[in-house]
Image (cartoon, rainbow, N blue to C red):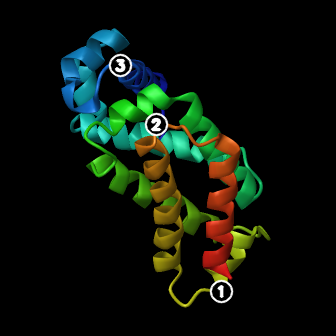
């Protein structure tokens, strides 16, 4: 879905609410109030708050991917964004990242990786996906490894330094594609 101003307003409203409230407790009415838009506008673009979340997370992942040239840059950017938005991600992962959010983010990252396979990039991950017997499975394995590290980091209250998390994820991803 091409994001227009109204869609962006709903995305921003959801992200603002996630700074203080768990996703499960956020209502469509709260999102509409925060966006200063009517419920009918919300339902013109989204089926429910989960649809909005998928759109917002998809846009977030795409922005990060578009700003990075290599898999190492992507990993560093993802970890930096998670660290900078701890409250939001904690509220998304209320009850642990075992929620549908985690599975959805794994799926989105895998889809972004698969889409990158169509580019002329010489990025190690892209090359591995092009050569893989089953590129979809590899994309999900890589995405799951990245999300698993984020889950572990959150469960440890982010006490492990960011640089250590980045290094571990990079090594894990490189080991998986060798």
Query: 143 and 127: which one is in front?
Result: 143
Q: Mark 2 and mark 1 in contact (Cβ < 8 Å)?
A: no
Q: Position of residue 130 (x, y in %)?
A: 65, 81
Q: Position of residue 127 (x, y in %)?
A: 71, 77
| Vertical arrangement, residue 111 with respect to residue 68, above or below | below
Identity of the residue drawn at 35% across and 17% down: 20
| Residue 95 image-quadrant placement | top left
Which residue corresponds to mark 3?
17
- Please identify, in this view, whether the residue under mark 2 or under mark 3 is nearer the observer: 2
| Vertical arrangement, residue 39 with respect to residue 146, above or below | above
Q: Position of residue 74 (x, y in %)?
A: 67, 52
Is 17 on the left-hand or right-hand side of 136? left
Which residue corresponds to mark 2?
157
Q: Residues within 10 Å of mark 1 (few under 14, many from 20)?
A: few
Q: Residues within 10 Å of mark 2 (few under 14, many from 20)?
A: few
Identity of the residue drawn at 70% across and 45% down: 163
Q: Give the quadrant of the C terminus.
A: bottom right
Distance CA(mark 2)–CA(mark 3): 21 Å
């Amino acid at each position: 879905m091409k994001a227009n101003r109204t869609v962006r307003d709903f995305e921003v409203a959801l992200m603002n609410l996630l700074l203080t409230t768990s996703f499960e407790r956020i209502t469509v009415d709260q999102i509409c109030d925060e966006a200063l838009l009517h419920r009918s506008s919300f339902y013109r673009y989204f089926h429910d708050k989960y649809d909005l979340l998928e759109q917002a997370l998809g846009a977030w992942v795409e922005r990060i991917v578009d700003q990075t040239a290599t898999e190492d840059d992507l990993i560093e950017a993802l970890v930096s964004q998670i660290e900078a938005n701890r409250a939001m991600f904690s509220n998304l992962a209320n009850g642990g990242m075992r929620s549908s959010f985690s599975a959805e983010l794994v799926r989105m990252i895998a889809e972004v990786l698969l889409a990158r396979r169509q580019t002329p990039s010489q990025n190690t991950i892209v090359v591995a996906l092009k050569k893989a017997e089953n590129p979809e499975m590899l994309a999900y394995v890589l995405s799951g490894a990245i999300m698993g590290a984020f889950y572990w980091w959150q469960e440890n209250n982010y006490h492990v330094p960011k640089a250590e998390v980045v290094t571990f994820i990079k090594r894990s991803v490189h080991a998986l594609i060798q």
